[in-house]
Image (cartoon, rainbow, N blue to C red):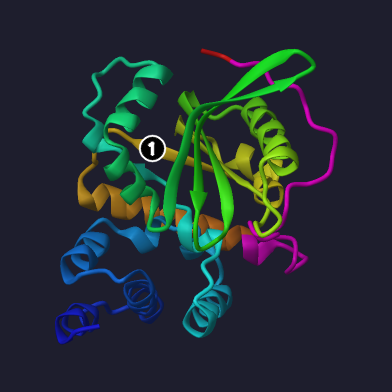
Amino acid sequence: MSWCHFRQLIYIPDELKRDFYAEMCRVEGWSTRVLAQKVSGMLYERTALSKKPEETIRHELAVLRKKGDVSPTLVFQDPYMLDFLQLSDSYSERDLESAILREIERFVLELGSGFAFVERQKRITLDGDDYYIDLLFFHRRMRRLVAVELKIGDFKPADSGQMELYLRWLDKHERQTSEEPPLGIILCAGKKRETVEYLDLDARGIHVAEYLTELPRREILQERLRRAIEAARSRLARSPDPNSEISLLAPPAKSRPRRANRKR
């Protein structure tokens, strides 16, 4: 990193946040312009990592520093900023998907470094029924397929069953021997955090995140993310078993998959 990088980093007061941006700069080769954009866009606060206890954050950053290994907690965000899609007030899931494909480069940059686009509307067939994965990506550093399902409404528990079916099929039919188990991202317009918490989706390799098609004022976003981080860490502190928060690195659970209906 150059002196210009360090000059930006030294003004970040939080040690963990500063270390996060320094390591991501080093691993992903950010320019000073990209670094400024990531800090301004509050990337750290939007990562799954920021919601973890401080000891976990330090451990993840130490692994990144020593081995260069990138975990899902470093990659996945919530919310995702999709204001660049310039969607109208009323849009469908197909409109959202088409807008993402038109702006695929910017969408991949918002997902994070290392994502490679694989396929749109990936068809899978089970018992004569066709199902379609909205978007399929591959993350080079994690060596995993990442399925993305788009929802224009709030997250519903049935959505997780649909994604779990997709992940099981990908694990059986598409996963290469050198790859880790696939992961899924459900991008929805809204979610109820208690519902997501009870479903224990991290243990099943599923990440639920909101997307914003219009950027709120910075102070509103800061307060929203602050509350989300505090709530997540509070839940972890109340957990009687320190291992109860299973990492996103875990493969999908082996319970019987639920049948999912494709809705368009």
Residue at x 30%, y 38% (from the top left corner)? 82
Amino acid residing under circle 1:
Tyr
Q: Is residue 48 above or below residue 191?
A: below
User: Magenta stretch: dominant SS?
Assistant: loop
Q: Is residue 135 above or below residue 74?
A: above
- Circle count: 1
Q: Is residue 161 magenta?
A: no
Closer to the camera in the image, 161 or 65: 65
Residue at x 24%, y 79% (from the top left corner)? 9
Left or right placement of residue 14 versus residue 85 in this view: right
Q: Residue 162: name its quadrant.
A: top right
Q: Secondary structure at mark 1?
A: strand
Residue annotated with mark 1: 211
Q: Is residue 245 magenta?
A: yes
Quadrant, the N terminus: bottom left
Residue at x 37%, y 71% (from the top left corner)? 24
Question: Could you tell me residue 195's position as x and y percent?
Answer: 63, 37
Closer to the camera in the image, 176 or 200: 176
Q: Residue 85: name its quadrant.
A: top left
- Other residues around mark 1 within 10 Å, as few (<14) / some (14–19) / many (≥20): many
Q: Which residues are magenta?
A: 236-262
